Each structure stands twice: as structure tokens, then as C-alpha cells.
Amino acid sequence: MKVNGIYTINNEVEFEELASHIGQAVWIHGSIYKIRKMKGFSFVLLRTKRNVVQCIASEQIEIPCEESCASILANVVKEERSKTGWELHIEEINIISTPKEISPIVINQKKVDTSIENLLDYRPITLRNEKERAIFKIQEGICRGFREFLYAEGFTEIHTPKIVQSGAEGGANIFSLNYFGQEAYLAQSPQFYKQMMVGVYERVFEIGPVFRAEKHDTSRHLNEYTSVDFEMGYINSFVEIMEMETAMLQHTMNYLLENYSMELECLNLQLPQIESIPAISFREAKIKVAEAYNREINDWEDFEPEEEKLLYEIIYKETGSEFVFVTHYPSKKRPFYAMDSRENSNVTESFDLLFRGLEITTGGQRIHTYEEQVAKMQAKGMHTELFESYLMMHKYGMPPHGGLGLGLERFTCKLLGYENVRYTTLFPRDINRLLP
Ligand code: AMO
């Protein structure tokens, strides 16, 4: 519609509505994704919110250059040979805006054919590629699936501070900042706050950014990532956390199948079957890998990334599962809030979930009594007076509880079959990257 000679966006139909307009003329807007000139007519691919719509333009129609934003008046014509059952014949194109320059990177092919550096340097543009944007639509679907599941299970969604006074996970990988003259940090995880909120709502979850000052440049480490955390009270064992995660993943795979089939097809993706997920203790897993591959065990306290991959191969061969829970990690390597096993205090009531050979989740049962928590902190050489506000919940009463944290980018990466977590991070922050 034009008002006083100026084009305004009005009364346009969405892609999903087009089928109900067969035989009518409608306005639809989007970006001109690709122009294919044929004899006597052109195909104009219009990139709308979620779809790329093929329109047909006769010779008389003047088509603006690619990446122009346009509103198109088109007849919706019945066409049985088309997947949608209709096609659009352009009557008129109104240009809403035109680019100043043509993109230096070709974005309208099946995939963006360039290096990972270019892909990320030109992220605002490369994300417009059909396949690239499908990745993050799937990531949206993962979060929606998780949310839908957790709401149904009685979890309350919370939003906790990202500027904090102390680290929650220990270690040196924490960013510090000057907070009005006081030393503060960027949250490594919502650990303390989600535990506190168990005392309030019993079951809570958060999907939010966390910050890790990792100095190493690997395919699985980011300096800012999205953590999916949940925490639940009144548990008997950390096994309940693993069961909840299994059900959450099953629900989410079904949710993706039902609501994101277009993106799954675009990415040529088969989702993994998740039935029951096998579990193996850390010690058993170490021995199993060492024996199967004739390797020496150099580190009894942690996995080497290679061992995680080998364990995946063994478990996959034995059970067909692409997921495996590894339980009872050594106390020395787990943070101070992890509950030690009653049977063996050298190991914790905790687990990691490995998916296709990569750790995607850490979780477990937490210490909930004041005396036990203080004793463990002291044994680890921590100054408990610095953690008074955290210990307040223990002091004034907490139920037995536990939870987990899942790295969203890592999970998406493995689900979509990428080797580097940066591919499934919208705007990655790593040791060399702060832009775009
Ligand atoms: P953890 O530190 O193991 O546990 O982190 C949980 C999960 O977060 C992901 N992750 C990362 N992803 C990308 N880049 C990184 N640098 C990175 N570091 C971790 C992984 C990992 O499994 N508070 C506990 C969780 C809990 O017990 O509830 C925690 O944060 O997928």
C-alpha cells in the first residue's frame, strides 16, 4: 500500500496462509534471495521469516537486485506439481530497501562455501543462508522442547545474575571485572542461584549465558556459551536427574520431529533414537577403554578427549546408543558442592552425559546440609567466610537436591554432526574472536 507516495507494509499474508488464498492475489514480503533468469521469465526466490518461496516473474516485471527487501503482489496459482500445491505469479514488486553493495560472500547456494573464519567474520550475512539459519532454528526448537518438557514437569523458569561475587565452579577460568571499585566476576554457571531457588520453588530451570575464561583454542570450548540448567529438590539419588534428562531429550527429539521437519530436511538430518541411555562408572569406563584399545591410563581423575571418543565407539557397538552416562567422577575433580558417595568418599554422586563422544552435560546430587558442606569446603582449602550468602541456604534448611548443566552449543553441534562448536554458535566468543 502507498500512503502519500510512500510505500507502507500492510495487509501482507504469511507463508503458512498462502494455501488458503489459491485463486487470489496477495501481498507477501521478504528479501530477494536469488534470481534465476530463464527464457521469457525469471524465478525469484523470496526469503521470508522461515521459508524460501519460489515466485515466477514474467519478462515485464523489473526485479530488484538480490538482498533487496521487497513486498510482492502475487497471484496464488494452483500447481499440483509443486510441493506446496501452489505457486506464486508476480504481479508487482514494491522495493522497501536495497543494499548499498553486493555481499562479498555468496550466501544463496545450498551451503556457504567458505572457510570457518569467513563464515564467522561475515556472520550477519552468512546466517541468511538457508542451511545456516536452519541450524539456529533447530537450536530454538531444542530450547522450546526443553522448556515445554520442564514446564510440564513442574519446573519454574528463573533468571539469575551474571555479575557475581565469586566463582561457582572453581579453577582459574573466570573473567573478573571492576564493579564500582570492587572485584566481581562473570558467572561461570548459575550453580549457586539455582540451588538457592530449589529452597523456593523445589524445581527450577534456566537457559542463559555463562562465561568461561578458557585460554585454549579447541573445537569444543567457547568463552561464552548457553547453559541449560535445571535443579530439583526431594530426590533420593542422582539417578533421578539422569532419568529426568533422558526424558527431556526424548521429548525434545519428538518436539523437533513434529515442529521442525522443514529444517531437519534442509540439514539432511536424522535424529538419534533415544531409548534408555546406558550408564557406566568413571572407573569402569577408564578400564574398558584402556583394555579395548590397549592404552595406558595416565590420568585416573579425568578423561582425555580421545578417551571420550573411544568410549562412545565401544558403547555404540555394544548397545547402539549414541549417548552414555558416566557416573561417580572422582571427588578431587568435582566442585565442592558435589555430594560424595556414601559407599566411597573418593567418588561423587555425579555424572557426565557424553553424546557422540563429547561431554554435553555435567550433573549430580549436591550437598544439602550445612555441616557437610562446610566440612567439604574446608577440606578443599576454601575460606567459608567468603561463601556466607551461599551457605545461608544450607544453614536454614534445604531438601536433598541435584541438577545438571547442558551446553546448548555442544549439544547442537553433535546433534547436527558438526565437528566444531563454533558452527552451532550464533556469534561465537573465543580466545581470538570478539566480533561480530
Ligand atoms: P560444567 O562446568 O561441566 O558443569 O559445564 C556443564 C556443561 O557446559 C558445557 N561447557 C561448555 N561448552 C562450551 N564451551 C565451554 N568452555 C564449556 N564448558 C562447559 C559442557 C558441560 O558439560 N554447574 C555445573 C553443572 C551442574 O552440575 O549442574 C557446570 O557448570 O556441555
Image (cartoon, rainbow, N blue to C red):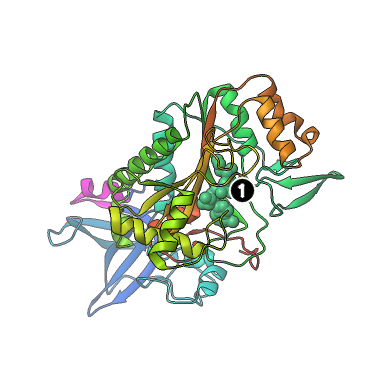
Q: Residue at x 48, y 67 (%)?
A: 126
Q: Residue at x 34, y 73 (%)?
A: 35
Q: Residue 216: x, y in percent?
A: 63, 65
Of residue 245 and residue 108, the one placed in the foreground of this image is 245
Magenta stretch, residue numbers: 15-26
Q: Is residue 143 magenta?
A: no
Splitting the image into 4 quarters, where does residue 107 fall? bottom left
Q: Residue at x 47, y 56 (%)?
A: 286
Of residue 284 and residue 243, the one placed in the foreground of this image is 284
Of residue 172 and residue 327, the one placed in the foreground of this image is 327
Asked if 228 appears above or below 153 in the picture, the reply is below
User: What amino acid type should be assigned to the residue bearing mark 1?
Assistant: Val
Of residue 361 and residue 384, the one placed in the foreground of this image is 384
404 lies left or right of 74: right
* Residue 234 at least partly seen: yes
Splitting the image into 4 quarters, where does residue 181 fall? top right
Q: How many marks?
A: 1
Q: Secondary structure at mark 1?
A: strand
87 lies left or right of 5: left
Q: Residues within 10 Å of mark 1 (few under 14, many from 20)?
A: some
Asked if 313 appears above or below 206 in the picture, the reply is below
Q: Quadrant of the C terminus?
A: bottom right
Mark 1 beta carbon near ligand 1 (under 8 Å): yes
* Residue 423 at least partly seen: no
Q: Residue at x 29, y 72 (%)?
A: 60
Residue lying at the far bottom in this picture: please name it: 39
Residue lying at the far right in this picture: please name it: 181
Q: Residue 121: x, y in percent?
A: 57, 70
Residue pointed to by mark 1 = 210
